[in-house]
Amino acid sequence: MIIAFGFFPVLLFLLCLFLLDSFKLVSVRLLALCLLWGIASAVLSYFVNTAFMDAFGLSDQWLSRYVAPVTEELIKGSLLFLLVARRQVGFMIDAAIYGFAIGTGFALAENTWYYLQLGAGFDVLLAIVRGFGTAIMHGGVVSLFAIILIEGVQREHHMALGGSIGMLVAIVLHSAFNHFIFDPLLMTLLIIIFLPMIFYLVFKYTTQHLQNWLEVEFSNEVDMLRMIRVGQFRETRAGQYLASLKEHFPAETLVDMYCFFSLYLELSIKAKRNMLLKESGFPLIMEPDIKDKLLELKTLRRIIGKSGEMALLPLVRMSHRELWELNQL
Amino acid sequence: MKHTTETRDDHMIVFLDGRLDTTQADAFEKAMTGLLDEGHTKIIFDCEKLNYISSSGLRIFLIMQKKMMGVAGKFTVCSLQPAIKEIFDMSGFTMIFNIQPDLEAALKEE
C-alpha cells in the first residue's frame, strides 16, 4: 500500500498533462514508448552508475550529487533527442508530456527498486518524498530538457545547441535536488507548487501560439492554393517571385519547384485539417492517395535540391514544424 | 460577423453574415453553445452571406457537429459561397459535414 504513494502522484501528474493536451498532439503509442524508455533508462543508469562507483571508488553522496544526474539525464533524454530529430515531436506541449513520461517511467522503476531494497524501511514519509518529490522531479527535469530542446529547434538553432542547454538545465536541477539543500519535505512542497505553474504557463503559451499559427497559415495556404487552381497564381506576389527565378534555374527545375509548392500547400492544408479534427475528437481523414503525394513531395524536394529549396524559402519554409506537420498525415 | 437566428418547423436556422475569424470566434462559439443548451437538435448554418472563414471558424463548425452527434441531432451547413465551399473541398471537410446547396434543401434533409 505504501508503494502507492511512490507511484500515484507522478502517474496522476502525467495523466493531467495528457488531458491538458487540447490539440491531442501526443500519440499514445509514443507515450507508452517513453514510459518504457524511462523504465529502461533506470535499469541502464543503475549499471552505468555502479560501473562508475566501482571504477573510481565514488561515495554514494558523490554519485548521487555529481555523477547520477549526468548519466541519468543523458540516458533519459536520448530518446527525446531521437524523437525530435525524427520530427515526431512538434511543439512544447507534446515535448513536455513525452519528457514527463520518460521521467515517470524512470521514477516508477527507481521507486520499485527502493521499495524492494528497503523493505520495511520504505516508510510513509519516504514514500511521500519519493512519490511527490523525487518522482515528479525526474519527470519535471526531462520535461524542461524537452521544452528547451524543441524551442531551440523551432527557433532554427542547431539541435545540439538547444539539446546542450536543455541537458545542462536538467542536470543542474537534478544535482541541486540531490544536494538536499533544503529539507526533503520542503523541496517536495516546492516541486508540487512550482512545477504545475511552469507547465500551466508553457501549455497556455503553446496553445495560443498553435492557434495563431493554424489561423494564419491555414487561411494563407487555402488562398494561395485557390489562386493556383484557378490559374491566377502568376498574379500573386508569390507567383511573380517564382517566375522571377527563371533566370536562375532551368525550366524543368522551375516546373518542379512550382509542383513542389502546390503539392506542399495541398498536404499542409490537409495536415492542419487533421489537427483540427483531432482537437475536436473526430477520427482523422486519410485520403487514399496521401502516401503517394507525400512520396511525390519527397521526390520533388530531392530533385529541386538544396538550392531550389533555398530559393523557395520566401514561399515554403521546410523547417522542423512544417516537416512535423506533414508527419501528421 | 453578425448572426441571426430563426426557428422554422423544428429547425433552428443560424444565418451567418460577414467574416468568421479569430476575433469573432469566441463570441460566436458562446452564442452557439447557448443554442445547444436550449436543447435544439436540428441546427442549420445558412452561410449565404458568410464571406470568410478561418480555422477558428471551422473549429466552431466541428464543435457543433460533434455536439449534435452526441445528442443524435442533425447539423447541416447550406448555401456556401463558392470561395468558402472551396475551403471545405480543399481541406476535405466536405466529408465531415452535411452540406446542402440551399436552405430549402437543408430543411428537406431528414
Image: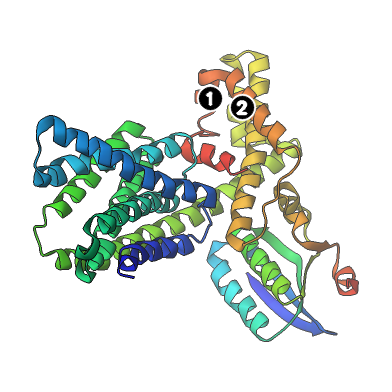
The answer to whether A105 appears left or right of A86 in the picture is: left
Q: Percent x, y for residue A305?
A: 55, 19
Identify the residue shown where x is 21% and y is 39%. A70
| Disc ID at residue A13 | none
Disc 1 target residue: A309
Identify the residue shown where x is 44% and y is 63%. A15
Disc 2 target residue: A298
Look at the numbered discs 1 and 2 and tell me whether their residues touch, using CB distance below 8 Å: no
Q: In the rendered structure, which amino acid carries the disc numbered 1?
A: Glu
Identify the residue shown where x is 55% and y is 42%. A325
Q: Label 2: chain?
A: A
- Position of the N terminus of chain A, as image quadrant, is bottom left
Q: Label 1: chain?
A: A
Is residue A238 or residue A187 the one in the foreground? A187
Q: Does residue B23 lie above or below A233 as drawn?
A: below
The answer to whether B92 appears left or right of A183 in the picture is: right
Residue A194 visible (yes or no):
no
The answer to whether A176 appears left or right of A287 in the picture is: left
